[in-house]
Image (cartoon, grey):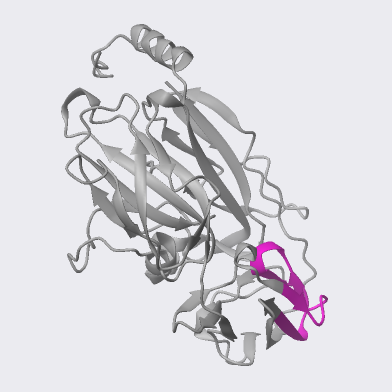
Amino acid sequence: MALADSTTMPRILRMALGMIIFCSADQALALNIIAPAENSTLKAGETITVKLDLGLHAGLEKVRYFWYTEHGDTLVEQEESATTGTAPGSKIADEKYFQKGSASTLWGTGHPIVAVAALVSTEQDHPPFGGQLPVPKEAIGTMRLLAVGKYPGGRLEGLAVFDEILVRVEPEAELISIEFETEKPLHLGRGGQTAAYDKVNALGQIIELPVVGVFADGVVRSIRPSSAGSTYQSSDEKVMKVLPDGMLRMVGNGRASITVTNRGKQASLDVEVELQEDPNLPPIADAGKNHTVRGGRRVVLNGLNSRDPEGGALFYTWSQVRGSKLALLDVNMPKASFLAPDVFERRLFRFKLRVTEGGYAREGFVKGGADSLPAYVDVVVEP
């Protein structure tokens, strides 16, 4: 039985059909990644056989596979590189492409950045819609594997068909050394601030150090997240305060040494903070409560409960970090929104909110003060 076009089928009948499917369906009806297994450990750079249980999803045209870091933004999806036209590869979508964008892209105000599929598979492949999937050689720690199915057109073309699992990736090679991809010492503030942090202008802001590991196989891997095994220590938390996942908050002027430990190796970076003294409490992001909706509904993400303890104005940044890519609107407003896609089974979408103290300048309202830690909200979409 085929699903009718959502634009022509009466809404009440469509919802009833979805309920029948949902209530009678277990995971056998869903498109599911069955290999590799959820939470399994893979080797960086190896090639694995990925397999799908298609459930009731007959007639698919292709399935695209994407690698993301655990909290990496879900980027615009495309089969081939938008700039080179090269064939799909085993790239990590956010680590290698997201960081090449401009700062305006990072804050959700600009240009879409393409995620390149690691594998594009059809029914003719073995196994069907699966096959030989390379694990990115640069991968380390917790990774997301996203499989997105596509129908060739017609009534099912707009159906969101995907599955996403978390796996752990470990390199076989030994860690040789830890490096910081920045100037040494790192100077933040007045007097020759490094260009990589040219927007650091207030105490309370957060930076993420570009910490990499040089491994015996010659691969340089980003080891900043805690899932990659890194721990951090500040010699003076009145200057630089250590936050989760290698984030560092500037809380006072002066010098501090940041020490990173991973796999028995250590490295330290001297940081000098020289900003205008202005005692400041960081804002708090609140992305709202998790909730469940039906496909076809307009969903509003509510960040209005975010707050600045000192009553200042806030700059909002919403992004998507789980699920197939959605068109997220008003990403720099207190409330963002999207149209929940029609789905054949329950599917999870996760969103991240960061807020920053803002103010008004000649060009209008701009961010420029202390940053919040990220807040997350889950939206489950049902048929």
Evaluate whether residue 377 shows in this view: yes
Residue 87: where, in percent of width, then height?
Answer: 20, 63
Q: Which residue lies at the image location 45% right of the left edge and 56% below the top edge?
A: 68
For the record, the magenta segment spans 232-259
Image position of 244 (left or right of 121): right
Residue 162 sits in which quadrant?
top left
Image position of 32 (left or right of 171): left
Residue 229: where, in percent of width, then height?
Answer: 64, 68
Q: Which residue lies at the image location 57% right of the left edge and 37% below the top edge?
A: 378
Image position of 50 (left or right of 180): left
Q: Is residue 12 above or below residue 75?
A: above
Image position of 210 (left or right of 267): left
Q: Is residue 59 above or below residue 203?
A: above
Q: Quadrant of the N terminus?
A: top left
Q: Is residue 187 above or below residue 112?
A: below
Q: Quadrant of the C terminus?
A: top left
Does residue 340 show up magenta in the picture?
no
In this orientation, which residue lies closer to the viewer: 11 or 229?
229
